[in-house]
Image (cartoon, rainbow, N blue to C red):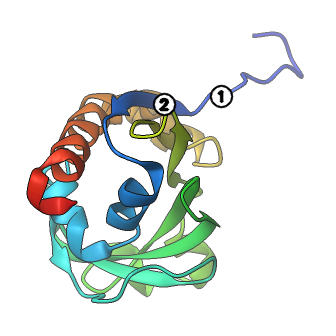
Amino acid sequence: MPLGEETVRVPVKVSRRIGAPAAMIFRVLADPRRHTELDGSGMLRGTVTMTPISGVGDVFIMKMYFSELGDYEMNNHVVEYEPDRRIGWEPEAGRGHPAAAEAASERRWGQRWSYELVPDGPDATIVTEVYDCSLVPAVTRRNMDDGEVWAEGMARTLERLDAACTRTDSR
């Protein structure tokens, strides 16, 4: 790469058409208690937060497990919230995570998880899960292939979201 040029980093996006209205899907995504049911990564172990997300500035806490870290929590700062259209958060190392003792600026790494919902007729929605790690330090981005390591888990999450929103008992 020539001096002065930077690689443009594109967020990882995975989409799925779900046969449910955007409002129903958004309600599920905005409820942290439902996230373990949806998790395609296998890392979520439960929630500390028992109330739905209500807007930008909310923080919800999830119990996590990763083999290299063991059990820990992530404090998720809601940075996008447009009812029935978009919801997103930036994780911050929480209790039990090695980085939790760091300065506040070191506990967040510049990653963002979000969902975009686009109605596709009256009873269907195109849901796109987005992982943006463009602000993550270069060495970490390389270790996770600029976020591509999450694509398979994101697809599984959307499959689970589909199942959760199209079951007859969830309507």
Quadrant of the image for the C terminus?
bottom left
Q: Give percent across and percent down for residue 148.
A: 40, 27
- Residue visible at 55% across and 72% down in the picture: 78
What amino acid type is highlighted by mark number 1? Arg
Which residue is the extreme one toward the top? 2
Q: Nearer the viewer, mark 2 or mark 1?
A: 2
Residue tagged 2: 13
Q: Position of residue 159 (x, y in %)?
A: 21, 36
Disc 2 to disc 1, how far (Cα)?
12 Å
Quadrant of the snapshot with the N terminus = top right
Q: Nearer the viewer, residue 68 or 164?
A: 164
For numbered disc 2, what is the local secondary structure? Answer: strand
Is residue 139 in view from this perspective?
no
**In screen coordinates, is 40 left or right of 114?**
left
The disc labelled 2 sits on which kind of residue?
Answer: Lys
- Residue 72 x, y percent position in the rendering: 22, 76
| For residue 48, above or below residue 167 | below
> Which corner quadrant of the image does residue 156 belong to?
top left
Q: Is residue 113 left or right of residue 24?
A: right
Residue where numbered disc 1 is placed: 9
Callout 1 secondary element: loop
Task: Determine if residue 110 is in view.
Answer: yes
- In the image, 164 versus 77, the foreground residue is 164
Q: Is residue 149 left or right of 5 when viewed as pictured?
A: left
10 Å crowding of disc 2: few (<14), some (14-19), many (20+): some
Q: Return the residue found at the far front.
A: 122
